[in-house]
Amino acid sequence: MENLSEIDVTELLRRAPKHGWCIVKLPEAFPFLRRGSDVDIFCHSIREFCDNILPCAVDVAERHSVQLLLNDVHVGRCHMDFIKEGSIELRIDLCDAAPPWTRVRLKETFMESVIYSAIPSTVPDRVGGSIQVRIPTAIDEAIIRYVEYAEYYWTGPDKLHHLRWLESQIPMQQRDAFFEKLHRYTALPSLQEQVDAKESRKAEDSALNGMDLLSLLFAKLGNRVRDPLGSVRLLKALLTRHRP
């Protein structure tokens, strides 16, 4: 593979705790990941996970002459980054608390449910062998992808690949179960959280000039060609958001 990361993530995962974690949004090319890729992991304890893999991570960083950085992004989330020449070679994105998304909130009990229900999966390593990891059930994976798609629908990078995954992996006969669990483990943010998020988005919007808005509009519409119904809602919302 072109631009293959030097870091073999399976070498690290072999030192991970035996239980209490799973890989979410497992990349299709895993473990043959491109430079700059990240591996998302839900775990019971970031500290326990790091304590287990850190000695190996230090050794891997030294062998490949890369820098190893640990960054506490916020409570419940930590990045373990392997940096080479100022760029991320590989990132392990660890969460032991539900992501603080602002549009639809995942309840804390969802994390426990995902990890408890995770299923073993045997995947190849990079030296001709294999390793067993745990991944969420299809419905749990779909919920994670759906909520992330909703979070970035208007203001961030498009996450259409999450919807495509849901459509391809969740057959119609499982959609009721998906929506039932989505409803059970999600909640709307509090009124104050919604106000804070709205003010934050307004501050970001105020930095955009007319050409930025046109670029945003055409970029979004370009990504919505395959979703014509969404294009109408998107255009209306954009015009409303940026009305003088």
Image (tube, grey):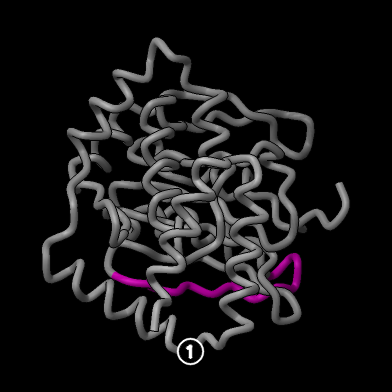
Can you identify the residue that label 1 sits on? 207
Instruction: Specify the segment rendered in magenta.
Output: 62-74
Visible residue check, residue 100: no
Q: Identify which residue is drawn at 69% across, 50% down.
A: 8
Residue 202 against residue 6 in the figure, above or below: below
Out of 107 and 134, give the one closest to the viewer.
107
Is residue 133 magenta-colored? no
Residue 3 against residue 201 in the figure, above or below: above
Visible residue check, residue 29: yes
Rendered-image quadrant of the C terminus: bottom left
Identify the image quadrant of residue 71.
bottom left
Of helix, strand and loop, which one carries label 1? loop
Q: Identify which residue is drawn at 63% across, 49% down.
A: 9
Q: Position of residue 178 (x, y in %)?
A: 33, 25
Q: Which residue lies furthest to the top in this view?
A: 173
Dominant secondary structure of the magenta stretch? strand
Out of 12 and 180, give the one closest to the viewer.
180
Q: Where is residue 198 in the image (x, y as percent from the top left)?
A: 28, 73
Q: In the figure, is residue 75 to the left or right of 172?
A: left
Q: Identify which residue is drawn at 24% across, 40% down.
A: 110
